[in-house]
Image: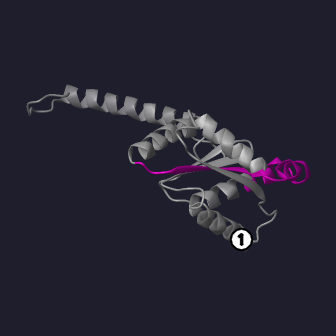
Amino acid sequence: MIDHEPREVELGDVDALRDLAGMAEQELKTLALATIDELSGLTNRRGFDAIASHTIAVCQRADKPATLMLFDLNGFKQVNDTLGHAAGDRLLQRLSRELRATFRDSDVVARFGGDEFCVLLSGATAIDVQRPLSILLDRLEKSGEKPPIVFSVGAATYDRQKHETVAHLVQEADIAMYR
């Protein structure tokens, strides 16, 4: 099927190409299932870890900063307990939509687990994240949807001296979030 010389495609070749395309399609579907959070439609933690490592490597080569923001929903358990899990799911989906709408396509937006989300912004310092954070807060306030989305957020800018892995960067953002 792969050759350096042009040739005529025969019926058997078409069948082989069709089979190969089906295998490739199945591989892509399997990868998507493994790296996308079904409820939010965002990248899941497994997908985030892979993409974040690559993003940070690219930023290092280009000598650009990268900043991770870690979000934790406040009062999420209370929403689930008082309004039900369906209401909690809708809250997670609303925040997912707003995060996707607020941040750039080049930013890695992920549901990190439970009621935690993260955004890795390439080419951005901790100061640079203030503008999109302000836009997000404004969008949430203007939506007027109930229950309101309230969250804590922490940010950490990648430093190759301090952060041996993406997990170390996440840990620093988590500490900042709890502060």
What range of the chain is rendered magenta? 63-91
Up-down relation of residue 16 to residue 106 (above or below): above
Number of callouts: 1
Q: Residue drawn 33% across and 28% down?
A: 19
Assign a secondary structure to mark 1: helix
Up-down relation of residue 71 to residue 53 (above or below): below
Does the magenta segment cover residue 71? yes
| 14 or 167, nearer to the observer | 167
Q: Residue drawn 57% across and 44% down?
A: 43
Looking at the image, residue 41 sits to the left or right of residue 32; the answer is right
Q: Is residue 40 visible?
A: no
- Find residue 175 and report its image quarter: top right
Q: Give the x, y percent position of residue 141.
A: 74, 70
Residue highlighted by disc 1: 143
Extreme-front residue of the structure: 161
- Find residue 126 and report its image quarter: bottom right
Q: Is residue 49 visible?
A: yes
Q: Give the x, y percent position of residue 178.
A: 78, 48
Q: Give the x, y percent position of residue 53.
A: 50, 37
Extreme-right residue of the structure: 82
Looking at the image, residue 44 sits to the left or right of residue 179; the answer is left
Callout 1 environment at 10 Å: few (<14), some (14 to 19), or many (20+)?
A: few
| 68 or 76, nearer to the observer | 68
What's the amino acid at mark 1? Ser
Up-down relation of residue 11 to residue 93 (above or below): above
Q: Residue drawn 38% across and 32% down?
A: 24
Q: Quadrant of the N terminus?
A: top left
Q: Residue drawn 71% across and 74% down?
A: 142
| 1 or 122, nearer to the observer | 122
Does the magenta segment cover residue 59? no
